[in-house]
Amino acid sequence: MAPTTAGLAPAWGVRAPGTGRASHIDPGMEYQGTTVQLAGLYPFVAGSGAPTLGTPIGRHMLWGEVVCLDPLEWLRAGLITNPGMFVLGQPGVGKSTIVKRLITGMTATGTQALILGDTKPDYTRLVEHLGGQVIRIGRGLDRLNPLDSGPLGTAMKRMGAAEARQLRLEIRGRRMSLLLALCALVRGRQIDNPEEVVLGRAIDVLAERSEADPTVPDVLALIEAGSDELRAAARARNDGEYRRRVDALVPTLALLCEGSLRGVFDGPTTRPLDLDAPAVSVDISRVAAANDQLVAAAMLCVWGYGFGMVDAAAVLAEQGLAPRRQYLGVMDELWRALRGASGLVEHADALTRLNRQRGMASVMVTHSLADLDALPSEEDRAKAQGFIERSAIKILAGLPPRELARVNEVIRLSGPERDLVSSWAAPEAWFAGRVHPGRGKYLVKTGERPGLPVALSLVGEEWELYDTDTAIRQAQP
């Protein structure tokens, strides 16, 4: 076919001698790299600007580039102001999957993961695979002493007199805070000020008498005996007046030892936390099958013990007695602990507020902001909302439009962002075996920046290690 002036030649050229016809064209070579690396070859690349610091959590759903996440690295780079993360999404869309990906990646780079109360359990297999420590709390299993000094007590033995005295006061304050929270939990309200004074004096007397950590039964026995020190603390002139002052406190402590919590918090700790483990998971799934009160008590104790581990590591590092460490703390099913009694939100808030100074990133996971409505008081609900507002990184999985309207009050979302997240909320039709449209899809929000829509794909052993539906499949006839 001869060339014409009316149109263009065919793609492979004109079929005629001397026209440069190509009978075969190889596909072009594809290269991938960052815009910095490839700018000289192809200077017109436009990406999403997603950070490349941290663990790869998936590909950008619009641009295809890899998105990385590490709250501690992002904080060091000045991308965020605090290392708090909040993960929100429907059940089954993969909230725990992205958290597990972060655990896997961050432990590989030296961060120690702390799963502070695994209620299902979702993280046991992963922690064991990483060579970490799994502690199983429950009746007939491991026991956790709420008054255990834990790693802080170990650190105190390695310090000088002045530093040890200061740390001893910190341990005393932690014991009091946790014991008051547990008493409020079983009683349904906070204890009175005179009762708090008696509890504090009882803990001091036990600490003076023995180097061993006191237990709740020790405190109960001492208050029932009514020593001179406790009568003086109660401002009681005689034994009868003292008995009236502690009349409500004794059954409250007894419930921690003899009620539904028996066998869990009524003795010395059986398995201390391992400061050198790459990851530690405290499995409270046996407790979670009982009741919300027991779950709340277990979570409070685990949180207190876990944050004590972080503080102990920081103290040892400051004294030059141990290398400086950094942690990723995971607080899943957060609201099951907070709705146990009024005032528990304040206890959790005090534990988590100083994460930046501790060198610790925290991840809070829940299904819906409607969980806030189950908290006992308006003050608790306001403080709990502060957890979300204070977290610099918010990760939204599939959420329905009604939930997104409420989320938008806390996290500013654009119209396209709301449409995208709501499109992940539910399957379009009833077809067995179809993958949920929101599985493995997340919108990562930081401040007022546009969100990063990310699709996470599992690789290799992740399919087995991150699977949370194993029990259901194994139960099939």
Image: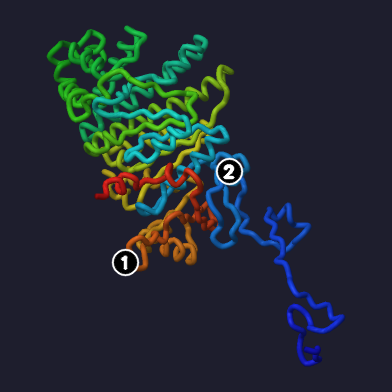
* Viewer-proximal residue among 213 and 252: 213
Assess disc 2: are there few (<14), some (14-19) or many (≥20) residues with their C-alpha within 10 Å of its C-alpha.
Answer: some
Left or right, residue 229 beside residue 151: left
Residue type (three-letter) at the residue carrying disc 1: Trp
Q: How is the image coloured?
A: rainbow
Q: Where residue 298 sits in the image (x, y, percent)?
A: 30, 32
The residue that mark 2 highlights is 54
Give the Cα distance between marks 2 and 1: 38 Å
Task: Assign the N terminus to one quadrant of the image.
Answer: bottom right
The image shows residue 369 at horizontal and vertical percentages of 35, 52
The residue to which callout 1 is attached is: 430
Percent coordinates x, y for residue 75 in the rendering:
58, 41
Q: Which amino acid does label 2 sit on?
A: Gly
CB-based contact (under 8 Å), mark 2 and mark 1: no
* Residue 368 visible in the current orientation: no
Q: Is mark 1 on a helix, strand or loop?
A: loop
Q: Nearer the viewer, mark 2 or mark 1?
A: 1
Q: From what the image shows, is residue 83 above or below residue 177?
A: below
Residue 301 visible (yes or no): yes
Label 2: element kind: loop
Q: Which residue is drawn at 15% across and 17% down?
A: 243
Q: Considering only vertical position in the picture, is 208 above or below 58?
A: above
Q: Residue at x 19, y 26 (%)?
A: 255
Total count of labels = 2
Nearest the viewer among 237 and 298 is 298
User: Which of 268/149 is in front?
Assistant: 268
Q: Is 391 placed left or right of 242 in the picture?
A: right
